[in-house]
Amino acid sequence: MGKKFSLGLDFGTESVRALLVEVETGREVGAATCEYPRGVLDEKLPGPDGAPLGPDWFLQDPRDYLTGLVEVVPASLREAGAAGEDVVGLGLDFTACTVMPTDAAGTPLCCIPEFQADPQAWVKLWKHHGSAAEAQRIEHVAEERGEPFMDYYAHAISSEWLLPKALEMRHRSLRVYDAAWTIVEGADWVPWQLTGRLARNACCAGFKAQYLEQLGGYPSHEFLEAVEAGFGDFYETKMPGPIVPAGHAVGGLTPEWAGRLGLAEGTPLSAGMIDAHMGVPGVGITEAGRMALVLGTSFCQLMLGDELHLCEGPLGIVRDGIISGFHAYEAGQSAGGDIYAWFVENCVSARCEEQARRQGVSVHEVLTEEAQRLAPGECGLLALDWWNGNRSTLMDAELSGLIVGATLNTRSSEIYRALIEATAFGTRRILEAYRAGGIDVRELVGCGGMPERNPFVVQVFADVCGMPIHVAGTSQAMALGAAMCGAAVAGRDRGGYDSIQEAAGRMAKPLRGTFTPVPEHVAVYDELYHEYAALYDRFGREGRLMHRLREIKARSR
Amino acid sequence: MGKKFSLGLDFGTESVRALLVEVETGREVGAATCEYPRGVLDEKLPGPDGAPLGPDWFLQDPRDYLTGLVEVVPASLREAGAAGEDVVGLGLDFTACTVMPTDAAGTPLCCIPEFQADPQAWVKLWKHHGSAAEAQRIEHVAEERGEPFMDYYAHAISSEWLLPKALEMRHRSLRVYDAAWTIVEGADWVPWQLTGRLARNACCAGFKAQYLEQLGGYPSHEFLEAVEAGFGDFYETKMPGPIVPAGHAVGGLTPEWAGRLGLAEGTPLSAGMIDAHMGVPGVGITEAGRMALVLGTSFCQLMLGDELHLCEGPLGIVRDGIISGFHAYEAGQSAGGDIYAWFVENCVSARCEEQARRQGVSVHEVLTEEAQRLAPGECGLLALDWWNGNRSTLMDAELSGLIVGATLNTRSSEIYRALIEATAFGTRRILEAYRAGGIDVRELVGCGGMPERNPFVVQVFADVCGMPIHVAGTSQAMALGAAMCGAAVAGRDRGGYDSIQEAAGRMAKPLRGTFTPVPEHVAVYDELYHEYAALYDRFGREGRLMHRLREIKARSR
């Protein structure tokens, strides 16, 4: 029998990647990436008359996902010189909660002329923050009623989740809401397109839509009706489809899609998973005590646990949400690399730009080179990392970024460093909440784009957290995890494996290296973290300044 | 008798300007500006082996002042087609406290080879902040001893003043301190060079060196000895020279300098004045109740008062400090236009730079154009304007800048606007302190570079303060004020006037226009100012975070 391959598909915020992996060895033999042609819509809808979007709105065009797929799958096969029929299975991960309304055929409403001018008909990207009021309402009613599911979500409802996004749709465009046969995650819509079958992956259902099997499934009709009259039947009517865990097949490729992608008809496709979560098996974590620290555009802290600890740090606790038999714990920061990118795009001196041009490197590299010459604390700045709100421990999308300590001598690179440190303090705050909740964090495994793109960031994280950070052996942890799922759905008979654990055991890469904390840095960062924690309480818990600024802003428009 | 002229010399932070004015009408007939060749030294001393400078240090090279003078005086005469002998008098203003050590001949120690490598031998610019510890010590001892002069300086000693800067010199370089025959303001050193006579202008002596005639002059020997053993004789030994008010002559031009400048030997030179203060007569204010709002690199709020009110807002109250017979009240913000310039230099997107290039305008213009399209409050940001510390009401150079409310959608122009608003809130805070102290502020007259360079800034100030701002009829208020002093020292016999008041009455320009507050803007800014005031108290009075960040920064170097 010739070599068999599994294909991992990783749908990120800006692009989709395909990774072709040899099932037996885990060797990555082909890879291709495609930037979404329309990227992230944050100012207006496409077209000359495209409607302007609200503040903190982030939409996407679902056609971009398929356009990307048709490009990256054949490209990864070509690179490997592999035949389509040797691909035994596919897996995928996706940003989430990234949702869209569709008709019964799976056609997104934004692709139907009569709805295309309405922002509510488009994909709401995970970081879309238009549904703050709805999240507050849902949270308020759930807490008031003592809904038991709230224990699993830190007693908070994020405006990034499915229910607030759906309710926002109902409020801003009842026409779109009524026309929606379903509201579906990108992670489930793509398999629906490819296999003709609509299923809900257990990971998104649990973490983003409050599906908890042990509590009987989705929140109740009565609860939703209490949130808003007429909304009670939301789950019953708008969320059809069985719950399927990753590593289990949604179905096989339709003839049409098999043809387009150059794969065999019927090739099994695993249920999807949230992108960050897919990094957990992707870096080889299939046991309790080891945390995957996913450092990408946003940051996630993910763990498997043998026991259930209902505590503050995690924003979601879902049994079987990543690997069957374990409680999956998720915490996260709504913006990570996104903050560094914001800074480079909006606030970098012409001097840096010019230096980057001259040296033929990126502005990030110029800033990092300058920033890492500073000692911890030398920039004299301290920041709160809430450029896109806070999504763990405070669960408040209305919070915003703060920076203090600026002088006339402050340089771009110093602000850049302070922003990196702020995101590391945010991670440390989450680690401390996990521990306070009784969850033992014994090891940190860094993955996501950052370890490769900017190792300095990982060193700062090690220094701030006072723990070594081991770097995953692949820079494509999520795509590799997805490929493991593809191997698991193929099953042993087709040359794959019987479970994700088994697949991870064979396909995961050895750790690539370790960032060790520097004791003198740890000492300074302990001191600065203490200040961070005080600011955190002041602006995140006690004061309401950030909320009032948003109110004034909203009124002024 | 042909036309007579007076020459006003305005020594700013970056450049010196000469303004030739027709004495009879106040008509500005010639003007020239020269950027200081070495500008502001903020990273290292000049030369390949120049010593690196501390954080928040700002030095200058005194030779730049004379280089500039030799260029601008003849140039202004040429422009007017005026003969040197028709210039009846000169006046000057200078940034302050901008001081240097010299030998007995007036040669600055930094121009003597054996001292040139020592930063303490150079001019310390007004905004140099290397003497924070010394200021604290002086303030502490003065308050402990109940020194009566402290009532006139808001019970605080600014590290920007002469005494801390001198004590810093004694601490960091006893060799330079011992070698200094005197320590002298730029405002007095230039006249010393030009006339051969060393006098101290009453304005700098009062506002920057605690000379109060009604209390018997400078602070006492005993007080200084209590500050530090051996420092007691500072004023007696290092500060020779009589106190001379502006509008009174220091002396006449030496033959050498008359030749260099193309003026007549013996032409009288008025005692200098602090640049901002010179704006008061310069805009035609010679009575109580009207405030000069000087908007330049830093901001000043200056008034004349009939009565003495010892209160919080002003950082200095000096009788005869501006115009004889009045109490001069000064308040100020250590950085104004400097903050906007910092932002443009360090934190502006390539997009703005490129747009400015394409349109052939400055980056400031691009940002302003975008910023003024926003409604008040729309940027969602709030800042504390302490990029160079706070110099009125809090009197704390260790404070630093803060900005809160940033999101991933925040644009450069929004931050730019928030910084402008922050400086306006800072001014309003000062106005409120004046009023709380019983000082009636009936009218605001805007001057300095800003009204001409960026009218939008003045509109924001009007909206934030809720008062009309009248704009001075000249964009050269300080240089014109200096020319009024030149006319006053000439005296009636030489074709001048008998006093500054008389000169101002004839030479001041009518107000050029008025920025009227927009009621809807005033309402939003009232709300935002309330938030500003709370942050101000939190970070300026209650908390010590900014101080601790500076401590950590200092330790880390």
Image (spheres, coloured by chain):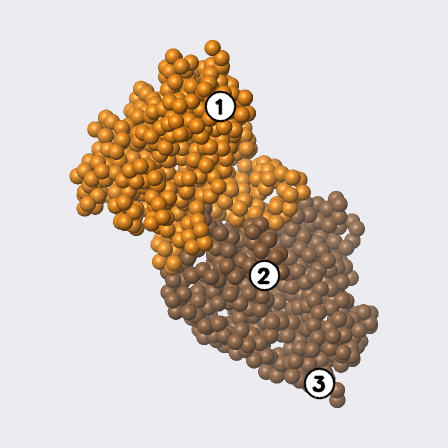
Chain colours: A orange, B brown
Give the secondary structure at mark 1.
Answer: strand
Residue at mark 1: A20
Tell me, yes or no, whether dots 1 and 3 are on the same chain: no
Residue at mark 2: B297
Q: Nearer the viewer, mark 3 or mark 2?
A: 2
Residue at the top extreme?
A: A1
Where's residue B442, x and y in %? Answer: 45, 75
Output the chain of dot 3: B
How far apart are the two marked residues, 3 and 2, measured between alpha carbons?
A: 35 Å
Of A124 and A151, the residue lying toward us: A124
**Mark 1 residue type:** Leu
**Mark 2 residue type:** Thr
Q: Which mark is residue A360?
A: none
Where's residue A212, x and y in %? Answer: 26, 29
Q: Quadrant of residue B7?
A: bottom right
Label 2: how many Cα within 10 Å (few below 14, some 14–19, many 20+) = many
Visible in this render: residue B49? yes
Residue at mark 3: B495
Give the secondary structure at mark 3.
Answer: loop
Where's residue A541, x and y in %? Answer: 34, 44
Residue at the left extreme?
A: A222
**Mark 3 residue type:** Gly
Tell me, yes or no, whether dots 2 and 1 are on the same chain: no
Output the chain of dot 2: B
Q: Residue at x 34, y 22 (%)?
A: A248
